[in-house]
Amino acid sequence: MEPSAIIAAVLSVVNTSRLIVHLFQRQMQRNRARRQRKLREDMNSERGTDLSQSTGPRPIEIMVAMGHVDPVERQFWARETSTDWWDRIVLQVWDESQWLRNFRMRKGTFLELCELLSPALKRQDTRMRAALTIQKRVAIDLWKLATPDSYRSVANQFGVGKSTVGVAVMQVAHAIVDLLLSKVVTLGDVQVIIDGFSAMGFPNCGGAIDGTHIPILGPDHQGSQYINRKGYFSMVLQALVDHKGRFTNINVGWPGKVHDARVFKNSGLFRRLQEGVYFPDRKITVGDVEMPIVILGDPAYPLMPWLMKPYTGALDTEKELFNYRLSKCRMVVECAFGRLKGRWRSLLTRSDLSQTNIPIVIAACCVLHNLCESKGETFVAGWEVEANRLAADYAQPDTRAIRRSQRDALRIREALKASFQSERGNQ
C-alpha cells in the first residue's frame, strides 16, 4: 500500500473516532440536563411541605445537580437466585434415602434438629431482604459439613450467595454448640456403659479415649505449632466414648504438634478423673486389689489407677491376652472417629475456617454424630470407603510413647492380667 493511502486511512479512522466521541458527549449532556430538570421539579414540589426540614438542597442533591453523582434508586443487595430446587424438590419430593444420603439423617430427624435450634436461629425479615428459613440454613450447614464441596458449589445448589453459605455454616454451628453440646455430649447412665464394656470383655470400664487430627490450612500465626508428625497442619480432637461409640466428652483446639498425652493432661477431663469426681465411686475387687471405674487408652496415654493402657515391649501370653481384651474395647473410639468423619467429610479435608471457628465446627460435628447415633440413623457403607479415600492424604500421626507408670496403676493392670488368664483357664 502506498504511503499516501496509509495516511488517508489513518485520518479516516481518527475522524470517525472524533465523531463518535462528539456524539457521545452530546448524549451525556442531554441526559445531564434531563436529570437536572427532573431534580428541580421534585425540589419545587416538595418545598414547604415539612417546616422541620431545611428548605435548602441536601449535599447529595447538590452533587447530583453538578453532575458528579447519578441518582440511583436503592436496590436489594442480594442478587436474584433460584430456590426451586430446595423449595419444590428437596422439601416436597425427596424420599428418606435421598435425605439420608445428602444430609446424613432422615427428614424427621432433620425437622427435629431445626426445632431444637430454632431459639438461636430465628431471624426477622427486613425491608431489604427476606431472612433465610431455619430449615434452609440448617440444610446448608449439613450439606457443607457432609461434603467436601466448595462454598460456591453449595451456594449454587441452594440458590444463595457464596458469603451466605459461610454465614449459615457458622450460625448453625454456634447454635448447635450453644444449645445442644451439654445435652447431647454427656456421660449418661454410667452403669449401662459399664455393663456394655463388661459384655465386650473389660470390667468396670467407663469409656475409651483417643485423639484424632483434623486437617486445616496453615494458620497466619504460630503455624509451625500446627504441623504434626506427618508434616501437615492439623488440630487435635480428643474424645472419650461409651461402649456404643457415642462421644461423652470432647476437647478440641490444640495444635497438631502437641502430643496426645499433653492434650489429655491439660484437659478438664483429666482433672476430674484425677480428683475422682467424673465417675461415681464404684470400685470392684480384682484379686486382692481395689479397682475404680477406669477408661482405656493406647500407649500414648499415661498409666493411671483410673486409666488402663496396653503392655509394650516383650509380651508373654498373659500380657497378650490383656492387650487383646483392652484393644477389643478400645476399638470403639477408633470406630467412632471413622463414623464421625465418614458422615461429616468436611473434617477429612483442610478446613479454610479461622482458628477460632474450626473448633466450633468440629464440636458441632461431634454433636451431630451423637444425634445420628442415638436416632439410629443408618451409616452407609460407601461413606467409609469415600472417607478412607479422602483420609489417605492425611494419615494420622503415630503418638505411641512409653512413659513411667504409677505403682497403683501397675498393680491394677497386673491383677487384671492375672484375672483374664484365670478366666481363660476356667473356660
Image (cartoon, rainbow, N blue to C red):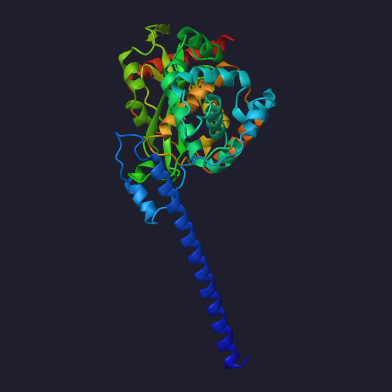
Q: Residue at x 68, y 30 (%)?
A: 89
272 or 25, nearer to the observer: 25
- Is residue 38 something one can see in this rendering? yes
- Is residue 311 something one can see in this rendering? no
Count of picture labels: 0
Q: Quadrant of residue 391?
A: top right
Residue 334's place in the image compared with 11, above or below, is above
Seen in the image, is 263 located left or right of residue 297? left
Q: Residue at x 47, y 44 (%)?
A: 73
265 or 110, nearer to the observer: 110
Q: Quadrant of residue 297?
A: top left
Residue 249's place in the image compared with 289, above or below, is below
307 or 367, nearer to the observer: 367
144 or 122, nearer to the observer: 122
Residue 402 image position (x, y, % from top left): 38, 32
Residue 189 image position (x, y, % from top left): 47, 9
Q: Quadrant of residue 15?
A: bottom right
Residue 397 image position (x, y, % from top left): 46, 38
Q: Residue at x 34, y 38 (%)?
A: 48
Pick the quarter of the image with the C terminus. top right
Residue 198 image position (x, y, % from top left): 52, 11
Pick the quarter of the image with the N terminus. bottom right
